[in-house]
Image: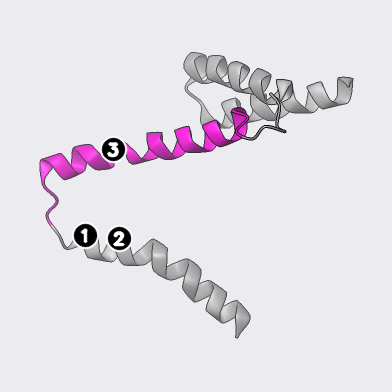
Amino acid sequence: MIILGGAIMTFLPRTFPLVVLSKIEIPDWGIRWLKYIPVAILTALLAQELLPLEDNEHWEVSHLAAAAVCLIAGLLTRSLLLTVGVGIAVVMLYNMLQ
């Protein structure tokens, strides 16, 4: 029952909006607004990981280095797979050298 319930709760939030929005004509301003959602989500994830928000937190050099290298790799290659791989490699190398 737990696995079935988990499957349903994973399936519904992904398919319900797709089914509903496929039957609705979205105006142009709505389409333009929806294009900003991936950027907003990525910004929130990056800010949460890179910026120290608590008094007892500090800047993680490995995360900042990986973010800088990923930015350069992403701009140069436009490849998500390569960008993620480079970021993982930078953090891994930094942690191995410490």
Q: Does label 3 or label 2 sit earlier along the sequence? A: 2
Dominant SS type (magenta): helix
| Residue with the mark numbered 3 | 35
The crowding category of the residue bearing disc 3, from other C-alpha atoms within 10 Å (few below 14, some 14 to 19, many at least 20), is few
Q: Which mark is residue 48?
A: none
Q: Amino acid at mark 1?
A: Ser
Q: In the drawing, does residue 73 fall left or right of residue 31? A: right
Residue occupying image coordinates x 23% and y 65%: 20
Magenta-tinted stretch? 25-53
Question: For this rendering, which residue is in front, 91 or 19?
Answer: 91
**Mark 1–mark 3 contact, CB under 8 Å?**
no
Q: Does label 1 or label 3 sit earlier along the sequence? A: 1
Query: 93 above or below 3?
Result: above
For mark 3, give the secondary structure.
Answer: loop
Distance from label 1 to label 3 (Cα)? 16 Å
On the image, the x and y values in percent for residue 33 come to 23, 39
| Residue with the mark numbered 2 | 18
**Mark 1–mark 2 contact, CB under 8 Å?**
yes
